[in-house]
Image (tube, rainbow, N blue to C red):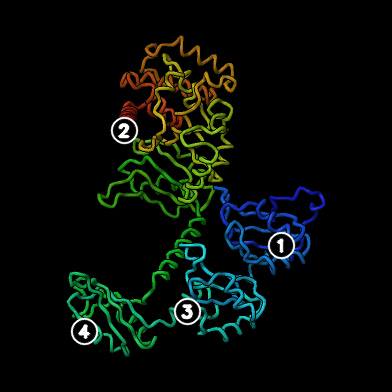
């Protein structure tokens, strides 16, 4: 265990105790801290350490803790005298800490009890079954409606299987608080569901003719064996819902019916144009369990290969084109362009799955920013939804949404530039997409990329006119990081101590000596000259060129639009400067975003 709370007295600072002196304390209230637990358990004996387990992201308590005593006798006395005692008005549950989960997962000595009275709690259940042997764990599943009410079922884990067998034999079908309870051997859900497929007698039927009756359907299935009942579900208006249930007496008859009639077309029974669907009836809990298992299996398969996410695709690009373009970098498992199902039009993004991680890394490095069908591609390592959510949570924990985090401020001020090797390492780790790398690499709009890079504009005034609190998610190819990377960055005059003196001087000089009209819009960018510059200087130069072009189109919003487009990668900005049509499209999209923000 990684102990987080230690007692101040030096005589308690000793080596970690044996496992027999470690206790698990569960069912804790959310506001219980290590100090609260120390006040409770120090009455029993010397406590070495206490740890309340918390969520890694939110730091909220998970409702359980570990308490380590100096003496195993003190730990044993705690279980005997303080189990189910109230901590902050909520009864806790104390048991020995077992680091090896094999005993718990094996099911040995574990029994299941149901049909319990709702006023039966953990202590009452423990007192009832403790007469049969030593209990390792005892729990009534709470209903969630109140702390004292249970769902009517629970579990008891005995130290030996003999004690569990005796409890099942003597308590099953007995009255407990006026309720006849069922006590049986505990079975894990996946194993239990697997056994159901060998014993079922109920069948689920659909795609039958809505005009047939229960008697007609019963007559149809009686050829496979004795049928107890047939029920066709009827809606409130008297029409059949298209679903029926057939209950056989024996499992073999139900199995024969499924094998013989599923996907068949019996005349007078099946709906015209359909095939009869017959399968084993499954409860909702079983269906949900199978869905979760299938999702877990898909996640496992997903982890075997390297998947890339590609966006800003032209409508003419299909899956075959995508596979052909990326196939030069390695063996491809699959390539797919996503389409709108309603109108079958490309949604502008897709996925390419490589067999090898190195192939995916090479493709992401080479293809990001490359022109395909007249549009620059955005290529990054694909992330699952839960991974993206965790990444956003991490950003929000380190800085409020809409404000730059300290790391991003450092990058925006020239102190956090990442080299190509660092970018590649981040790409391989799947920790940050290229857009986030760009957000940390360049000056963007903290006065270096805006005030200094755009002639004829004061950095502070331009920052005041930037739209705040919104990303650029609606613009294809834009990273949507305006809120974190640029919009609410502190003004240059608010943090002069963080800004390098040469950069500040260059920004002031560029803002005063170069009017916007002094740079003709037809001036291009020399790639050789650009290659000799630093990242910051590249952004400044591209910002000047971009501002001059945009000022000819939208002079009233040139500063804002330039700041938005500077979020793009340098290669994408160069493509915009070389293609007036692409630049016009991006300017139109940016104007639409600004109008939406102003509304």
**Mark 4 Cα-neighbour bin, 10 Å: few <14, some 14–19, many ≥20:** few
Labels 2, 3: front one: 2
Whole-angstrom CA distance, mark 2 to mark 1, is 59 Å
Asked whether the viewer can see residue 523, the reply is yes
Secondary structure at numbered mark 2: helix
Front position among marks 1 and 4: 1
Disc on the earlier residue, 2 or 1? 1
Name the mark on residue 22: 1
Q: Residue at x 46, y 18 (%)?
A: 459
Q: Residues within 10 Å of mark 1 (few under 14, many from 20)?
A: many
Please provide percent x and percent y for residue 126. Answer: 60, 74
Residue occupying image coordinates x 48% and y 56%: 302
Label 2, label 3: how many angstroms apart (C-alpha)?
A: 58 Å
Query: Looking at the picture, does residue 504 appear above or below residue 441?
Result: above
Q: Quadrant of the C terminus?
A: top left
Residue 574 shows in this picture = no
Q: Nearer the viewer, residue 328 or 1?
A: 1
> How many numbered marks, from 0 up?
4
């Amino acid at each position: 265990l990684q102990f987080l709370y230690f007692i101040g007295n030096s005589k308690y600072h000793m080596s970690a105790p044996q496992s027999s002196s470690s206790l698990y304390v569960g069912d804790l209230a959310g506001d219980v801290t290590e100090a609260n637990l120390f006040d409770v358990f120090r009455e029993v004996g010397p406590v070495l350490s206490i740890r309340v387990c918390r969520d890694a992201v939110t730091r909220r308590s998970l409702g359980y803790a570990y308490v380590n005593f100096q003496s195993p006798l003190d730990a044993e006395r705690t279980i005997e005298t303080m189990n189910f005692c109230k901590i902050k008005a909520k009864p806790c549950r104390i048991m020995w800490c077992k680091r090896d989960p094999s005993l718990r997962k094996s099911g040995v000595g574990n029994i299941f009890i149901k049909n319990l009275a709702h006023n039966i709690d953990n202590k009452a259940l423990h007192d009832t079954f403790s007469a049969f042997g030593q209990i390792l764990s005892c729990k009534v599943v709470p209903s969630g409606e109140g702390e004292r009410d249970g769902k009517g079922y629970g579990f008891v884990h005995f130290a030996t299987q003999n004690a569990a067998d005796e409890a099942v034999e003597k308590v099953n079908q007995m009255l407990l608080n006026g309720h006849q309870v069922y006590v049986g051997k505990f079975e894990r859900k996946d194993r239990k569901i697997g056994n159901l497929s060998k014993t079922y007698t109920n069948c689920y039927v659909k795609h039958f003719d809505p005009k047939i009756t229960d008697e007609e359907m019963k007559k149809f299935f009686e050829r496979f064996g004795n049928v107890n009942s047939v029920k066709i579900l009827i809606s409130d208006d008297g029409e059949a819902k298209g679903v029926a249930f057939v209950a056989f007496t024996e499992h073999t008859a139900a199995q024969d019916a499924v094998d013989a009639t599923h996907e068949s077309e019996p005349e007078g029974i099946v709906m015209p144009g359909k095939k009869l669907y017959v399968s084993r009836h499954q409860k909702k809990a079983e269906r949900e369990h199978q869905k979760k298992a299938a999702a877990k299996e898909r996640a496992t398969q997903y982890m075997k290969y390297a998947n890339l996410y590609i966006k800003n695709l032209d409508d003419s690009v299909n899956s075959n084109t995508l596979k052909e373009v990326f196939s030069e970098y390695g063996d491809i498992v699959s390539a797919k362009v996503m389409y709108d199902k309603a109108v079958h039009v490309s949604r502008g993004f897709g996925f390419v799955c490589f067999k090898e991680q190195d192939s995916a890394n090479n493709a992401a490095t080479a293809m990001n920013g490359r022109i395909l069908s007249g549009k620059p591609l955005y290529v990054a390592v694909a992330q699952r939804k839960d991974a993206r959510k965790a990444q956003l949570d991490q950003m929000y924990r380190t800085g409020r949404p809409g404000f730059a985090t300290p790391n991003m401020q450092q990058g925006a001020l020239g102190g956090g530039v990442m080299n190509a090797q660092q970018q590649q390492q981040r790409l391989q780790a799947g920790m940050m997409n290229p857009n986030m790398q760009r957000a940390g690499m360049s000056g963007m709009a903290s006065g270096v990329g805006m005030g200094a890079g755009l002639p004829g504009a004061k950095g502070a005034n331009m920052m005041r006119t930037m739209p705040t609190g919104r990303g650029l998610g609606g613009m294809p190819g834009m990273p949507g990081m305006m809120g974190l990377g640029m919009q609410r960055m502190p003004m240059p005059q608010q943090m002069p101590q963080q800004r390098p003196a040469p950069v500040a001087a260059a920004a002031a000089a560029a803002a005063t000596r170069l009017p916007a009209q002094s740079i003709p819009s037809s001036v291009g960018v020399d790639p050789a000259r650009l290659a000799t510059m630093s990242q910051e200087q590249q952004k400044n130069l591209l910002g000047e060129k971009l501002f001059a072009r945009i000022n000819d189109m939208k002079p009233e919003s040139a500063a804002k639009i330039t700041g938005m487009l500077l979020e793009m990668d340098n290669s994408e900005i160069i493509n915009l400067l070389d293609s007036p049509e692409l630049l016009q499209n991006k300017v139109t999209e940016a104007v639409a975003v600004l109008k939406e923000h102003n509304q």
